[in-house]
Amino acid sequence: MKKTIIITGAGKGLGRAITLRLARMEHKFLLVGRNEADLSQLCEEAIALNSEAKYVVADLARPESASLIVNTCIETYSSLDVLINNAGVANPFSIENTPVEQWDLMMAVNARAPFLLCKKAIPFLRESSEATIINISSVVGRKGYVNQAAYTASKHALTGFTKALAKEVQPMGIRVHLISPGGVATETLARTRPDLSQNGLMQPEEIAEVVAFLLSMKGNAMIDEINLRRLNSTPFD
């Protein structure tokens, strides 16, 4: 069955990989990002894989973006089945040197935007028999790292929000999943963690496979959270 899917942060990295993996399953997409050229190219690639795809250029730091995104999806496809909150901002600062503006930005994009998108999407998702929300958190959503206090706080907030969300929408038949990966080879990680060797990093396509698996689940089994670590990192840490 074709699903109507919103993916934020779709233009690069993990969002792009998720889009292309799911496009092989011939779904309908509304792709969200800040770079129009990236989104336009990705739409062309998704369409070449026999999917339907449109895009919205939006800054998730702006609260009004949530209404724009969901309304555009409904106006375009008349339905919504899956919301994937993937967009994120990560800028490294020590606590003493964290500008308030950066704290606010990371909280706005990483925590507030998923809340607002879920709030706007739930009335339409509850009408779908395939309704699913996937929030992309991070290992920092359960651990703390030096020079990542603001980012860590925002991902902890997203993790906590997802736990409450899952309980609230369960009676509506909406599935909620949280994916919390460790180091993934993206531009963001290269900038924020230059100390990590590129050799051992997970690839965006590996996370995309997990997303595809979660969307394939149709029975009575349910996965709340998937924690993914690098193969060479410490097990059960």
Image (tube, rainbow, N blue to C red):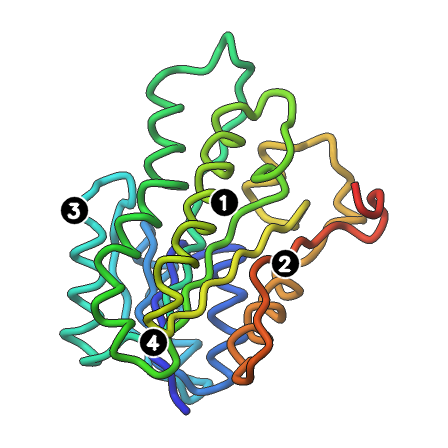
The reply, left or right, for residue 222 in relation to residue 8 is right
Give the residue at x 54% y 41%.
188
Q: Secondary structure at mark 1?
A: helix
Give the residue at x 25% y 51%.
58
Q: Which residue is mark 4?
A: 81
> Looking at the image, is mark 2 or mark 3 earlier in the sequence?
3
Distance Cα–Cα, label 4 vs label 2: 21 Å
With respect to residue 91, does 183 lie above or below? below
> What kind of residue is marked 1?
Thr
> What kind of residue is marked 4?
Asp
Q: Outermost residue toward the top?
A: 96
Residue count near mark 1 (Cα–Cα under 10 Å), binned few <14, some 14–19, many ≥20: many
Residue count near mark 2 (Cα–Cα under 10 Å), binned few <14, some 14–19, many ≥20: some
Q: Which residue is mark 3?
A: 64
Name the quarter where the N terminus is drawn. Answer: bottom left
Label disc, if present, on residue 159 of the rendered structure: 1
Give the residue at x 56% y 26%.
148
Quarter of the image where one finds residue 172: bottom left
The nearer-to-camera label among 1 and 3 is 1
> What kind of residue is marked 3?
Glu
The reply, left or right, for residue 235 in relation to residue 223 is right
Residue 119 position within the rendered picture, expressed as x and y whole percent measured from the top left: 25, 55
Distance Cα–Cα, label 1 vs label 4: 22 Å
> Looking at the image, is mark 4 or mark 2 earlier in the sequence?
4
